[in-house]
Image (cartoon, rainbow, N blue to C red):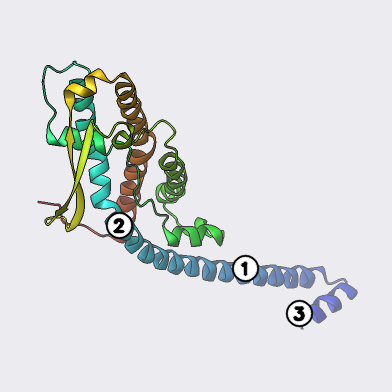
Amino acid sequence: MILRRLTTAVRKQDWFTVAVETLIVVFGVFIGLQVNNWNAARGDRADELSFLERLHPDIVRVEDSSARVRDRRIAVIDDLRSATEVIFGVAARDQLTQAECMALATSHYYNINVLSLPSVVELENSGRISIIRDAALRTALVEYEQRVDTFTIRQNDQSLSNNLLMLNPQLVKVTPVFDAELGEMQTLPECDLAAMREDQAFLNAVAENLDAYDAYLRDGLLPWDAQLKEVHRLVDRALGITHESAP
């Protein structure tokens, strides 16, 4: 009907009517676009909330799946450093502690569950990462997936890591034991410090392991762990979640 009136007005050269009818059409289109945009924005907000509510348990699952091993891997470096100082005579001691001996025996262990966040992967694959309004969280999620890729490569690269147990079995002997507290099998190592100091190949391997393990933590595990914690913090903030502090 508007088009018919507009055509009639043009034929009659009724420019006032033409202008009014044109404004009505433009205004109608504008209102229609605004309604569509509003509906789309409302849909994005609902999708964002749904995504965040799915993301939080994903984060908790990743943390829980790696917590014990993650803490163990991080704790090893201090004992490995002190063991190296004792072996090379920097520290004036004539024996290694049990923890230092264990650190040597496990210095080639890099394995840990490094998991992606399924909800983030799904959102990225659908090209909808932009529905997350918090720019810091959006960036943190992308960086987390990049950290996963980097850490996986670092974890799989053990070119400078030596299995000291197999290099010279007489220097580090292990006995299998069941740890009732952890509910898992463990190895109980025994280190021959005097013999270690006389074996240059073993000394070289220990030095390489310390350097490789330090790089594994610095360039892989610690950045990944820190990024996971940052994502968790930002998601908690977005959802208004407060976790009780550990005692």
Residue receiving disc 1: 33
Crowding around mark 1 (Cα neighbors within 10 Å: few <14, some 14 to 19, many 20+) is few
Crowding around mark 3 (Cα neighbors within 10 Å: few <14, some 14 to 19, many 20+) is few
Dot 2: element: helix
Crowding around mark 2 (Cα neighbors within 10 Å: few <14, some 14 to 19, many 20+) is some
Left or right position of 177 against 39? left
The quarter holding residue 143 reads top left
**In this rendering, the label closer to the viewer, 1 or 2:** 2
Q: Which amino acid does the dot numbered 3 rest on?
A: Ile
- How far is disc 3 from disc 1 in space, using C-alphas? 19 Å
Q: Which amino acid does the dot numbered 2 rest on?
A: Ser
The residue positioned 36% from the left and 35% from the top of the image is 216
Q: Earlier in the sequence, mark 3 or mark 2?
A: 3
Q: Position of residue 78 (x, y in %)?
A: 21, 31
Q: Position of residue 49 (x, y in %)?
A: 39, 66
164 over 195 or under it: above or below: below
Left or right position of 230 against 181? right
Q: Earlier in the sequence, mark 1 or mark 2?
A: 1
Q: Earlier in the sequence, mark 3 or mark 1?
A: 3
**In this rendering, the label closer to the viewer, 3 or 2:** 2
**In this rendering, the label closer to the viewer, 3 or 1:** 1
The residue positioned 32% from the left and 36% from the top of the image is 166
Left or right position of 82 against 128? left
> Of residues 239 and 190, which is closer to you in this image?
190
Task: Identify the mark at residue 2; answer none if there is no mark.
Answer: 3
The quarter holding residue 156 reads top left
Residue receiving disc 2: 65
The residue positioned 43% from the left and 39% from the top of the image is 154
